[in-house]
Image (cartoon, rainbow, N blue to C red):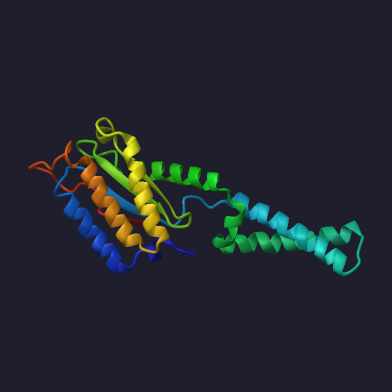
Amino acid sequence: MNTAQTFLTQDEQDTLIRCVQEVETQTSGEIVPMVADASYEYPRASLIGGLIGGGLVGIGAALAFGQEDLWFFLAVFLAAFLILSRLLEAFPALKKPFISKRQMREEVEEAAFTAFYRHGLHRTRDLTGILIYVSAYEHQVQVLADKGINDKVDPQVWQEVVTMVTEGIRAGKPGEALCRGVTRCGELVAEKFPVKADDTDELPNLIIDG
């Protein structure tokens, strides 16, 4: 399973940081790419997977041994449930069949919102923070901008960046995709938020949260 630490190679991280620095010479926008391990632990998926797997193992064992005793089924079911639920916790990639796309999307949205404030993107001088949030486990992307930008730039434009980065990740080129996303963010805000003479780099140029 991809983690934040393995999502980008060191060369890709270095290139991405240089990309952010270059783009920020053209705008007062503060663009922060961030890669997180996962947006949520999905404990319910372990429970559901354990219940389904335990039930199937219990039924299979009862049929294989010709047992109609309910206590036999329950004993096998419970043992299988405990083993499978712990296996799912140990190997999160196995949880994915038991997680809906809607839940993943909602958890990524919430995690991106939390990360925006946890990492101080709302504290820039001109309220020009932009977060490109990538959740490695879900392979999903969110883009959030602060009030200063959203007052002048339609928030709907960020979906273009989300699509651009998501497609690059699916193509196996996350570093290039994030660099293109950063560049596009700069293009979208440069006209209304040009770089100022006293502009400083207020935020990290890359956050690896894992």
**Count of numbered labels shown in the rendering:** 0
Q: Is residue 152 left or right of residue 199?
A: right
- Name above or below for residue 118 compared with residue 167: above
Q: Quadrant of residue 157?
A: top left
Viewer can see residue 84: yes
Residue 116 versus residue 187: which sits nearer the camera? Answer: 187
Image height check: is 189 above or below 52?
above
Can residue 210 be seen by looking at this rendering?
no
Q: Residue at x 33, y 42 (%)?
A: 158
Judged left or right of residue 17, residue 160 is: right
Q: Is residue 115 above or below residue 52?
A: above
**Where residue 38 sits: x, y (%)?**
46, 54
Residue 174 position in % (x across, y down): 35, 60
Pick whichever, 157 or 102, lies toward us: 157
Rendering coords of residue 159 (x, y %): 36, 43
Left or right of residue 113: residue 63: right
Q: Which residue is at 29% across, 63% downward? A: 13
- Residue 168's image quarter? bottom left
Up-down relation of residue 129 to residue 39 (above or below)? above
The answer to which image quadrant residue 28 occupies is: top left
Name which residue lies at 32% across and 57% down: 177
Where is the C terminus found, in terms of image quarters? bottom left
Q: Can you name the residue that lies furthest to the left here?
A: 197
The residue located at (26%, 39%) in the rendering is: 123
Residue 146 percent coordinates (x, y): 29, 37
